[in-house]
Image (tube, rainbow, N blue to C red):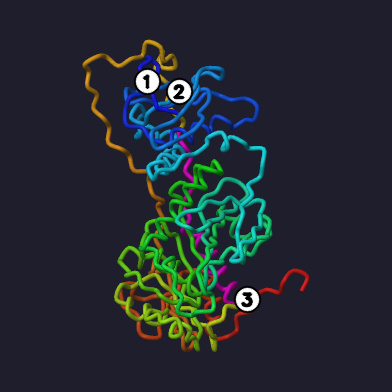
Amino acid sequence: MVFLDITMKTICNLGGDWGWKISICAILFLFVSIGSAEPVSLTGSSGKKVDFAILKEATPKGITAHMTEDGPLMGIPWDKLDLPALKREHPLIYAAYEQSQAGETIDLQTLSDTSKQPEATVTDENGRKSTYPGWFDTSVSGVTYLMQMPVGEPRGVLFVGQGDDGFASTYLLGKDMGTGPWADIQNKYGLAVMTYHFTTGDRRDPTNNPDFIFAGKGSGAAVLKAINDIAIKSKQESLIDAPIALFGSGKVGGGFAYNFTQWVPERVMTAVVAKGGFYDQEATEASAKVPMLFIWGEYSNAHEIWGSENDAKKVLAENASLKPNWTSGREFRGTDMMNLACEYFAVKYLESIIERRIPEKVEKKPEPEPEEGAENAEGAEAKEGEEEEEPEPETPPLPVFPEIERSKGFVGNVETGEAIKMKDPSAELGEDETFIPQGQFVTDWKKFVTGQFRPPPPPGG
């Protein structure tokens, strides 16, 4: 369809610098109730609102829409719509707008079907496809990202990356919501569980180190885009700029979780990096404030086989001067292999930190009542010759995390398993010392580093 330079009075009122997201958001809210389509109100640069009965498609040029259900299909360029208003009123549409700027087109009508459960499709290295009901999916830069919602509205994302290759999804798929290994955290704190799937080449080659590990090279931005993509597909506005907790194990999973935390610390509640390497992204004062647990084996040497210069022991020592809120969880006589004790130790840590760090849910303020007559687009043209000052685009607020109070924490000795109350929060810790957050986790840490930590028996075991 050729986009028209709409001149009819109703569309002229839209004017402005609006974006692609409008189309998506509009369709999302348009079909909230099946069988009854309510009009979607979009704000133009003149400040006037115009109702659309149906939004059809969003493209890099703009949207196609019907003003009435049986009206003609028209094209609306983005410059007739108001981006700042879009950010405030329809975050999901704004996310869709950003997608369109990368050249994507979205069939908005497919997003309106709420009668079906999501069903992600994953292809293995041999080209065989498997589908997983209950999971949303999107593909960014050759990587498939999958997400399973918690019960109720999501308050954040739990990103789970496991293994030495790109097949992290195999650890999670096949589990219904509320039954997987992260179900307790997922539903207690309202976290959408996210994972990934991609082919890495020769899985037997220990020197095959995919760029996905290094968040600053593009995979970090791809994950943030994937979260927004799925927010649109799932109609979950709260996922836009949501806080993220990470669990990463192995070469790819652990490396990515560490590097992502350093790359965008303002989005990260907490992270666990386990039995990994390639912890290469430079730490900063901001990333040092993010509580992070390093799980590594006393006899680990996989990083040497992989060719990684930066393992847990090295980065903990090199960044001690930052006084980081990082915890060394050295597994007593542990090797490079993950096991149930390590995984459960990670769960206990994440529980203790998320409890303190997850931002309070902020209720969305109701939209102000429209000006009298604003709902009627006819005759609402901006005055000729009158130049309106275009408002600066508003940046969506990032999550605000409660700070970890080091003065309430403990200093642990990884060699002896002893832990004492922190006396001087500003002091640099010694070679065998580590920071331990406040709470019951101190007991778990003592048991883990002395070889006494045991996971609970499996159900029915």
- Name the residue rendered at 66%, 55% in the picture: 132
Q: Are marks 3 and 2 in contact (CB under 8 Å)?
A: no
Mark 3 vs 2, N-terminal side: 2
User: Label 2 amino acid?
Assistant: Met
User: Is residue 280 a member of the stretch shown in magenta?
Assistant: no
| Quadrant of image for the C terminus | bottom right
Q: Are marks 2 and 1 in contact (CB under 8 Å)?
A: yes
Identify the residue under disc 1: 6
Graded by Cα atoms within 10 Å as few (under 14), some (14 to 19) or many (20 or more), the crowding at tag 3 reads: few
Picture quadrant where residue 123 is located: bottom right
User: Is residue 364 a member of the stretch shown in magenta?
Assistant: yes
| Quadrant of image for the N terminus | top left
- Is 260 in front, or is 64? 64
Instruction: Tell me the chief SS of the magenta region.
Output: helix
User: Label 3 amino acid?
Assistant: Leu
Q: Marks 2 and 1, Cα distance to the nearest angstrom?
A: 8 Å
Picture quadrant where residue 344 is located: bottom right
- Is 5 in front, or is 290? 5
Identify the residue under disc 2: 74
Mark 2 vs 1, N-terminal side: 1
The region drawn magenta spans 341-365
Graded by Cα atoms within 10 Å as few (under 14), some (14 to 19) or many (20 or more), the crowding at tag 2 reads: many
Q: Marks 3 and 1, Cα distance to the nearest angstrom?
A: 62 Å
Nearer the observer: mark 3 or 2; the answer is: 2
Rendered image: mark on residue 340: 3
Q: Position of residue 363 (x, y in %)?
A: 48, 40
User: Label 1 amino acid?
Assistant: Ile
